[in-house]
Image: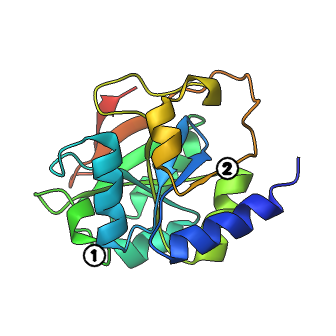
Amino acid sequence: MNFTADVEHCLQVLQAGGVILYPTDTVWGLGCDATNHLAVQKIYRIKQREETKSMIVLLTEERDVIKYVAQPDLRIFDYLDETSKPTTVIYKDAVGMAPNLIAPDGSIAIRIVRDEFCRHLIKRLRKPLVSTSANISGQPAPALFSTIDPAITTAADYVVQYRQTDTRIAQPSAVIRWNDDGTVTVLRK
């Protein structure tokens, strides 16, 4: 299916500080410009989530991580090349992101996406994209579009049409913390 029209609508909404509901390389997500603190705040309200709980940011390339993390350990990219499951990495010392997106300890959760739709959207936006599961905080992440709470779909400024009828059961990403000594702490398999 062609997603060009969806990307165009998403760009208009994201550039205006809005929130999109979109398919990712894992579960359906709520997204916004990760550099816009008001847009990030809107997602926290939609999810009824405390702002102390961080959200994931999607990027398309390793070099993009270097723009938003002060001195990342480049060995992480070798690790990610070995993984087949989408993996979110918690990096220390985030820079250039909305302040309400950065954890109190200064860290940020970033996933480099391989999904064609997400990659195309992020490259056109030219900014990092927030990705948090499209659910009210505490409820299960939606594995299919049809399982998303109507309160979420009506709160989003744009709902992507692409992949709404997908029946492939999606899983959340793995989450790891990259330690200073080059070891990995697995937070979610």
Please give the name of the residue rendered at 72% of the width and 69% of the height, measured from the top-left corner.
8
* Image quarter of the C terminus: top left
Q: Find the residue positioned furthest to the right.
A: 1
Decide if residue 128 is in sight here. yes
Asked if residue 96 is positioned above or below residue 44 in the image, the reply reads below
Q: Earlier in the sequence, mark 1 or mark 2?
A: 1
Q: CA distance from mark 1 to mark 2?
A: 29 Å
Residue behind mark 2: 160
Nearer to me, 188 or 183: 188
Q: Position of residue 19 (x, y in %)?
A: 48, 59
> Of helix, strand and loop, which one carries label 1?
loop
Q: Is residue 71 left or right of residue 146?
A: left
Task: Describe the element under mark 2 as helix, strand or loop.
Answer: loop
**Labels 1 & 2 near each other (Cβ < 8 A):** no
Give the image location of residue 32, x and y in percent: 46, 62
Residue count near mark 2 (Cα–Cα under 10 Å), binned few <14, some 14–19, many ≥20 = some
Asked whether residue 173 appears in the rendered view, the answer is no
x 41%, y 33%: residue: 135
**Does residue 165 appear left or right of residue 169 in this picture?**
right
Q: Is residue 111 above or below residue 189?
A: below
Residue assigned mark 1? 95
Q: Residues within 10 Å of mark 1 (few under 14, many from 20)?
A: some
Q: Residue at x 17, y 45 (%)?
A: 50
Vertical comparison of 189 with 96: above or below: above
Q: Amino acid at mark 2?
A: Val
